[in-house]
């Protein structure tokens, strides 16, 4: 099981891809790549309204302050990369830029996770409903002695994993994460859960 392709995909999507992204992206020189894009902010306001958007921003600030500022992590990392007076070929400047971009990236991830929570309950209810419907479909097919291809379940399982992996990966991506994206994720996940439940043997 530990060496299966399925476990290999789990390792890739939930460990290696996010880890490499967090480690390599802050090295990019453009700080705007780590800000919350205007299109994303406007999309959140249009979907949640100004009041909920303000609540999401306040929650993001509180979370970031509690876990990263008040614990001293931000200050310690900033102090360790202060510009050096010794000629070092630009290493100190690179390290300072990396740290600043890293914390901008972390803040944006916290913000996106906070916004995602507003869509989580609806996605969960929809996913459960689709799973139950798929289970009923499987029982009806079994009662009629219908054939179910095991490949369908296999592909649906990998599709579910892919959806979760992409969801976590785009939290880091330097592109506008528009609010309708969460609807697309919920739709894909529900359809795949239905397929997995209806083709399970």
Image (cartoon, rainbow, N blue to C red):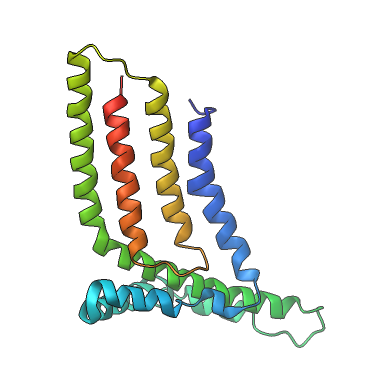
Between 25 and 43, which is closer to the camera in this rendering?
Answer: 43
Between 50 and 58, which is closer to the camera in this rendering?
Answer: 50
Residue 44 in sight: yes
Image vertical order of residue 110 relative to residue 8, above or below:
below
Q: What residue sits 41% from the left and 47% below the top?
A: 163
Relative to residue 141, is residue 95 drawn left or right? right
Q: What residue sits 80% from the left and 85% below the top?
A: 86
Image vertical order of residue 51 relative to residue 67, above or below:
below
Residue placed farthest to the top in the image?
A: 145
Image vertical order of residue 133 relative to residue 90, above or below:
above
Q: Quadrant of residue 41?
A: bottom left
Spot occupied by residue 141 in the image (x, y as percentages of width and height):
22, 19
Q: How many marks?
A: 0
Q: Quadrant of residue 61?
A: bottom left
Residue placed farthest to the bottom in the image?
A: 85
Q: What residue sits 47% from the left and 69% below the top?
A: 106
Relative to residue 124, is residue 72 drawn left or right? right
Relative to residue 71, is residue 79 drawn left or right? right
Spot occupied by residue 200 in the image (x, y as percentages of width and height):
30, 24
Residue 77 in sight: no
Q: What residue sits 43% from the left and 55% below the top?
A: 168
Q: Quadrant of the C terminus?
A: top left
Spot occupied by residue 191 in the image (x, y as percentages of width and height):
30, 41
Spot occupied by residue 65 in the image (x, y as percentages of width and height):
37, 77
């Amino acid at each position: 099981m530990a060496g299966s392709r399925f476990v290999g995909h789990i390792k890739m999507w939930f460990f290696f891809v996010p880890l490499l992204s967090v480690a390599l992206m802050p090295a990019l020189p453009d700080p705007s790549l780590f800000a919350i894009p205007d299109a994303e902010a406007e999309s959140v306001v249009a979907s949640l309204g100004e009041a909920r958007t303000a609540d999401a921003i306040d929650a993001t600030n509180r979370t970031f302050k509690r876990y990263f500022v008040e614990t001293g992590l931000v200050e310690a990392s900033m102090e360790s990369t202060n510009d050096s007076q010794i000629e070092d070929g630009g290493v100190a400047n690179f390290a300072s830029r990396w740290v600043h971009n890293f914390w901008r990236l972390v803040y944006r991830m916290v913000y996106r996770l906070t916004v995602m929570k507003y869509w989580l309950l609806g996605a969960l209810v929809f996913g459960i409903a689709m799973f139950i419907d798929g289970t009923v479909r499987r029982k009806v097919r079994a009662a009629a002695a219908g054939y179910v291809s095991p490949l369908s379940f296999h592909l649906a399982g990998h599709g579910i994993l892919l959806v979760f992996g992409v969801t976590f990966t785009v939290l880091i991506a330097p592109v506008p994460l528009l609010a309708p994206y969460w609807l697309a994720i919920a739709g894909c996940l529900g359809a795949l859960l239905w397929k997995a439940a209806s083709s399970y043997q």
